[in-house]
Amino acid sequence: MELVDPADRPRCPEEAVMTQIESTETNGIDVTALVQTIEATKEDPSLSSFTFRARSIWQDGTHNVGQIHGFTHAGAQDHSRAAPFVLHGDEPPVLLGANKGANAVELLLQGLAFCYAVGFVANAAARGIEISRMEYEVEGDFDVRPFLGMPGQRPGFSRIRATGRVSSPNATPEQLQQLCRYVQDTSPVRDSLVNAVPVETTLQVI
Amino acid sequence: MELVDPADRPRCPEEAVMTQIESTETNGIDVTALVQTIEATKEDPSLSSFTFRARSIWQDGTHNVGQIHGFTHAGAQDHSRAAPFVLHGDEPPVLLGANKGANAVELLLQGLAFCYAVGFVANAAARGIEISRMEYEVEGDFDVRPFLGMPGQRPGFSRIRATGRVSSPNATPEQLQQLCRYVQDTSPVRDSLVNAVPVETTLQVI
């Protein structure tokens, strides 16, 4: 993240005392905490390590209930979430479901939209760019034939398109386009899609 | 999908008449409809084409609201969903958020879990395998440094592990393991992760 460290700003002695309690917030992002996170991770690289988790419990037909709760950070379990986030997954009728929730491939597109949005707003905050409005629309082309056991294109998305719409009161269009490129280069979800991720799958028969 | 077409079963004349209204259901999957879908797609390959969509609207900080609603099937808009599915995306406090929802990379893991579950239960139904219980747990290792602008591993998941737990009253462990391998080979989400997907990103400054 291309940061201007708030500690580098010229300040008077009174302001220096204030930094102990001051929080610099832009776009709802606590930039002071962001800088502290970066500095702490530089000092102790083990802080950069996360293992995230999701669980799904089959209900009936194409309907599953998902739970996202704890994760591991720097080797320790995070306990910040009192209860799991619960998601319903299902297919539309044309894919033999009852629309009790979004389907699996739609969640991938939603993940990319959220990832771009978080990356954009956080990096904007780090650069002092204010965001007044931001939306993403993501769409992906998909051939269901391989899933149905027929020859076709690949089983997954053949192509994904993402369009962001952003307004800023203090940045030029060029700055925002440059930020958009930076966000793509550092996006965890985009990287997991445009580059191969090893997936190890095991089945326990119980 | 390795199907035994119900039409191939020996049947008496009375049963033949019944097939007009009969629905063969296994694991909550309408196998008759599944076979009809496959046959229709074989006859008209344009039926295999889908474009799915997700939208995200930024709220504040790392909090975004996602909407998943319509999709395009065979060139036409699907109208089966009266209202959008609404998801909240956010980060945990350690990543500068307030836990108003799961984060972007967790949604990817949830998508893989749902995809495996749907693939398993549908292909089991097609093979006459009854499923009495099925769960998936998926976890992914992640290095936050590239997202924070520091050298590190790749921005995305370095590795994903999925574990299924399944019970069946009428299948052998070998049949279930074989099915698990088939589901991996045809899983849209797994394929989108283990193989590269082209992602085209554009930004509109408004």
Image: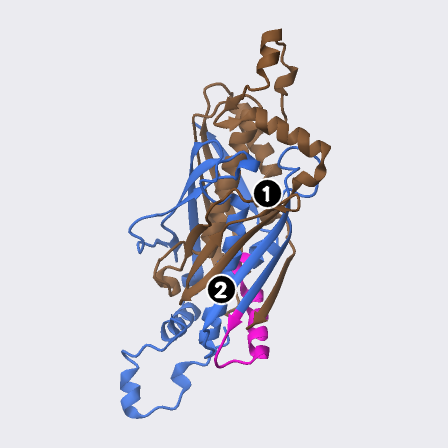
Chain colours: A brown, B blue
Quadrant the N terminus of chain A occupies: top right
Q: Quadrant of residue B181?
A: bottom right
Q: Which mark is residue B24?
A: none
Quadrant the C terminus of chain A occupies: bottom right
Residue B127 shown in magenta: no
Residue B204, position as x, y percentages in the image: 46, 31
Residue A23 position (above or below residue B124) = above
Q: Nearer the viewer, residue B130 or A204?
A: A204
| Residue to which mark 2 is pinned | B117
Q: Which mark is residue A188?
A: 1
The residue at the point 43 percent across, 56 percent down is A103
Amino acid type of the residue that numbered disc 1 sits on in the rendered structure: Pro
Q: How many marks?
A: 2
Amino acid type of the residue that numbered disc 2 sits on in the rendered structure: Ala
Label 2 marks a residue whose chain is B
Residue A140, position as x, y percentages in the image: 48, 50
Residue B186 shown in magenta: yes
Label 1 marks a residue whose chain is A
Query: Do dots 1 and 2 share one subunit?
Result: no
Q: Element under label 1?
A: helix
Q: Is residue A147 visible?
A: no
Q: Residues within 10 Å of mark 2 (few under 14, many from 20)?
A: many
Task: Provide the residue span drawn in magenta.
Answer: B166-189
Residue B82, position as x, y percentages in the image: 28, 51
The residue at the point 53 percent across, 32 percent down is A120
